[in-house]
Amino acid sequence: MQKRRMIKWLLVAVVILAGIGSYTTRSKQATNQQSITAVGSTALQPLVEAASEEYSAEHSGIFINVQGGGSGTGLSQIESGAVQMGNSDLFAQEKAGINPQKLVDHKIAVVGVTPIVNKKVGIHRLTSKQLIAIFTGKVKNWQQVGGKNLPITLINRTQGSGTRVTFEEYGLNGRESAVAQEQDSSGTVRQIVSSTPGAISYVSFGYVNKDVQPITINGIKPTERNVMDNDWKIWSYEHIYTNGQPTGLTKKFLHYLQNDHIQKTLFNKLGYISVKDMQYQRTWQGKISKRSGVE
Amino acid sequence: MQDQKLAKQLFKKSKTARYEHFGRFLCFCALLLIMVIVIGIILFIATKGMSTFLKDHISMKDFFTGTLWNPGTKTPDGHAAVGALPMILGSFLVTILAAVISTPFAIGTAVYMTEISPKRGAKILQPVTELLVGIPSVVYGFIGLSVVVPFVRNVFGGSGFGILSGTFVLFVMILPTIVSMTVDSLKSVPTYYRQASLALGATKWQTIWKVVLRAATPGILTAVVFGMARAFGEALAVQMVIGNASLMPHNLISPASTLTSVLTAGMGNTVMGSMQNDALWSLALVLLVMSLLFNLLVHFIGRKGAFSK
Amino acid sequence: MNRVQKQSQVAIIILKAIAGFVVLILAFLIGYIFITGLPNVSWKFLTSPAKAFSSGGGIGVQLFNSFYLLILAMLISLPIALGASIYLNEYAKDNWFTSMIRTSIEILSSLPSVVVGLFGFLLFVVHYNFGFSIISGALTLTIFNLPLLTRNIEESLASVADDQRQGGLGLGLSKYETIIHIVVPAALPGIISGVILCSGRVFGEAAALIYTAGQSAPALNFGDWNPFNIDSPLSPLRPAETLAVHIWKINSEGIMPDLTQVSSGSAAVLVLAILIFNLSARYIGRKVFEKMTSMN
């Protein structure tokens, strides 16, 4: 009995000593390790994550923690100061419940949004009017807009999602879509559209693949070039918000995101458009103006 | 002096007694901790959920009888668009349908595993059911999307998204839970019940039906409640196949929505503390209250149907 | 053969058919997962880190995270659940208060995990400032796990025959000693299957972890096992995407070209991992049971 107790205490002592030992001998880096956190938009997450990995590889001891959670989470967390960067698909002004006064907007990229349909529908182009008629539920069958005899299945993104807000604002000219199915991620939307006959929805350019058919509206193709010239109207900014002007590591990292190297390599892969390539700019109220020169 | 010392020694708790008290105290602390967590979460949801009505001044009537869900806007006739009725109905329908379908299957399987072929049951069925509990709901959702939805579309018509698809997916999801808990309660029926019944000349089926199942009724009901609870709280899988349209479900193959699917999908897109967010927490509160009612109901049935010893 | 016997036979055939049907469904599910998934699994897939945009990513870090989180969550929740269920089943009086406690535990287990996740997010990540980390994830999983685990353990304690308790008390053991040395060992097989059941649920849980353990898996330095370094696999303060969260994430927002392969491969690995975990837990449980109930 006595012996067993001895062993027990010995074990406890060893564990404590090991703890103290490893704490004091943790690598020298640990003392100047810095970390910042970005939370929010799931659309922006892959970009920031990839950039942060490259940044950490170049600067040792730096950790940039990138999380999703949605634009609403990003904005509420940045407003409360719990994180250093809040990612959002929308202007803070467009989101209910946010006081945009203290927040500083950094426009990282531009994304185009395009309607997509199931391949069996047999439609490649629509007019703006037809698109609105479809999404407001006035047209129920693809035959009415020149397609096959198939009932139309509308698929929306969740209320409040950045893609949906952008699509309703600029694709449906501010009209609200009829109540229909909702999915909360682009991946699921794409899968459902590709497998459901007669389905129509909308995704950002990066999610278009061979399984779905993007739609040409009023003769204008959904391409990056057309977005840059504002011929394709359905686009929005991807924002990173900071609480007050960024300082220290946050500032350096935001700067890094905007350099040419990142914008040339990562953006292409994601189907994002660099803000620098845009010929036009847009305010949060939706006012379009010609962009003059380089910022 | 001597007497006092002796008295002290006698009145002092023995080592065993102290050990006993210590052990009992530890267990009590554990329970207390769980209670703190439970009460904490319930209070948290209650305060968050009530603020829709108290802070944002939405009337309860609009919330429970309205059929249009678009928080922050108004319905055409001027009420706040926070009608949760479609979701409440949707949740109820999928949960009850799934439980109704899977209960006979689960009980049948459990009886087979314990009464008819215990060896095969323990060797094959038990590990498999335990395995299935661990499959993430996302995977169920995707199998549902690629197998169940096309099946429903081809057999029953419509787009394939709707309560029926949700029911099928949930049926498979809650089956393992109900089976393994039913098995536990069947196993806890003492063997001499069966022996006594067989000795009285009852057939195997009569023994199973009139003795074993009767004795295990409270346990089976608990299993069903847990299954229903899982169905009720399940979000990711149902969300993929039910269609998430906040429309009144007018048949089983039209897109509908459940409380959890709307809750999960909307949480990330709303801002903490805004009215839209509060409305979602109210859905969570409804969920909590509804599972409370479920529980009470089943306990009531359980007590009535219990086998009096 | 009389009517009653015939009835019995028919009923048993029906029961067998039901069981067969259920086996069929389960076999189809597992077969589906393995057939679509296993061809994508290779050693490289299991060990290499994930890639965001290009094909050929693996799930090494996620797999490790899943196990690490599971073990941590179980280490925290098992003693609590055991203690609570002992108190509920052995000490607590059978009155309205006890049944109220039971009911509230049952209610907690039916809450959608996303609500538990948000609670964990507000409490651990934001309020206690643990950040998106393993520790926040493990504590949230504990909350998620406790009700069901407690209920399962209590069930298996209740199924221990009262003779055993009387025997222990009759030998002069105190109540607590009876519980620890007689009742718990006797209930061990039930407790183990409860633990396995809960582990499976924890292993496959995604919604509770999205907001707590996070959805990013930074590369780890597997040569550094000092838990105080942030890139060490053992560090409790690093964000940790688990396998289930990874499946959810790539399916919802993934843009890599080999998305379906990675996703179905991950699902197969997940099921396989649970299988291995179950089998080994069962084996260890049997050994412990034999040791504790043997005569020496």
Image (tube, rainbow, N blue to C red):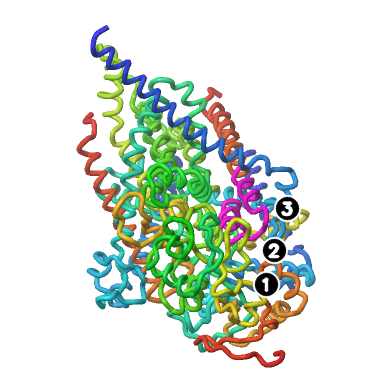
Residue topped by disc 3: C56
On what subunit does the disc labeled 3 rest?
C
Label placed on residue A35: 1
Residue B23 percent location from the top left of the image: 44, 45
Can residue A107 be seen in the rendering of this structure? yes
On what subunit does the disc labeled 1 rest?
A
Tags 3 and 2 on a common chain: yes
Q: Secondary structure at mark 3?
A: loop
- Marks 1 and 3, how far apart in space? 29 Å
CB of mark 2 within 8 Å of CB of mark 1? Answer: yes
- Marks 3 and 2, how far apart in space? 26 Å
Q: Is residue B103 above or below residue B90?
A: above
Is residue B54 or residue C295 the one in the foreground?
A: B54
Can residue B21 be seen in the rendering of this structure? no
Which residue is rendered at x = 26% and y = 67% of the image? B66
- Dominant SS of magenta comes to helix
CB of mark 1 within 8 Å of CB of mark 3? Answer: no
Residue C272 percent location from the top left of the image: 61, 39
A241 relative position to C153: left or right: right
Residue B121 percent location from the top left of the image: 46, 25
Label placed on residue C230: 2
Which residue is rendered at x = 70% and y = 73% of the image? A34
B289 relative position to A201: left or right: left
Q: Which residues are magenta?
A: C240-268
